[in-house]
Each structure stands twice: as C-alpha cells, then as structure tokens.
Image (tube, helix red, strand yellow):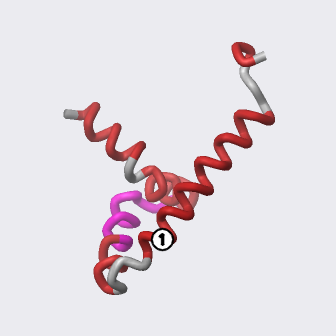
Amino acid sequence: MNKFRYFVENQIFGVCAELGEKLNFPASSIRKYFIYATFMTFGSPIILYLVLAFWMELHQHWRRHNSPTIWEL
C-alpha cells in the first residue's frame, strides 16, 4: 500500500509536494487548498496546476541536460 501511496504522491501530486518542500509547508495542506480553490472557481486552478507540472518537468530536463551523470557521458 505504501508503494501505491508514494507513486500517487510523486506522479500525480508532484506539484503540490514540490511546492510544499520549497515553501516549507505541508503538502497535504496545499493539496487541500488546491481542491477547495478548484471547486470554488469551477476548475480554473487545474490550468495553473498543468502549467506548473509542465514547468517542473522542463526544469528537470534542463538540469539533467546541463549536468549529465557519468553513465550519460
């Protein structure tokens, strides 16, 4: 069950977890406020969530490209 929880947190809720890590705020609270905001504004924060997810993936790609590991050389 823990493997499933970590998969969901890392893959689906990666944006909230990373924001919580950077802001030193519990990721569960960020998720809860995001869900509240989504219901209150009829889904418009989902666009922000997708933009942040895309930006995080792009940032990881740049970081891997600029500093490759020994196996990628």
Q: Residue at the spot x=55%, y=64% of the render?
A: 51
Quadrant occupied by the C terminus: top right
- Up the image or down, 15 lies above or below 34; here it is above
Quadrant occupied by the N terminus: top left
> Was residue 52 drawn as part of the magenta stretch in this picture?
no
> Was residue 26 drawn as part of the magenta stretch in this picture?
yes
Q: Which amino acid does label 1 sit on?
A: Ile
- Up the image or down, 48 lies above or below 50; here it is below
Judged by its main secondary structure, the magenta piece is helix
Q: Give the range drawn in magenta.
A: 24-34
Q: Residue at the spot x=73%, y=42% of the render?
A: 62
Q: Disc 1 designates what residue?
A: 47
Furthest residue in direction bottom, as rendered: 41
Furthest residue in direction left, as rendered: 1
x and y, in percent, of residue 22 in the image? 57, 56
x and y, in percent, of residue 33 in the image? 36, 73
Q: Residue at the spot x=36%, y=46% of the render?
A: 9
x and y, in percent, of residue 25 in the image? 46, 62
Which quadrant of the view contains residue 8?
A: top left
Q: How many marks?
A: 1
Local SS, label 1? helix
- Up the image or down, 50 lies above or below 61; here it is below
Residue in the foreground of this view, choosing between 26 and 36: 36
x and y, in percent, of residue 3 in the image? 28, 31
Q: How crowded is mark 1: few (under 14 residues within 10 Å), some or many (20 or more)?
A: few
Q: Residue at the spot x=52%, y=59% of the render?
A: 19
Q: In this view, does 69 lie to the left or right of 3?
A: right
Which quadrant of the view contains residue 63?
A: top right
Q: In this view, does 1 lie to the left or right of 53?
A: left
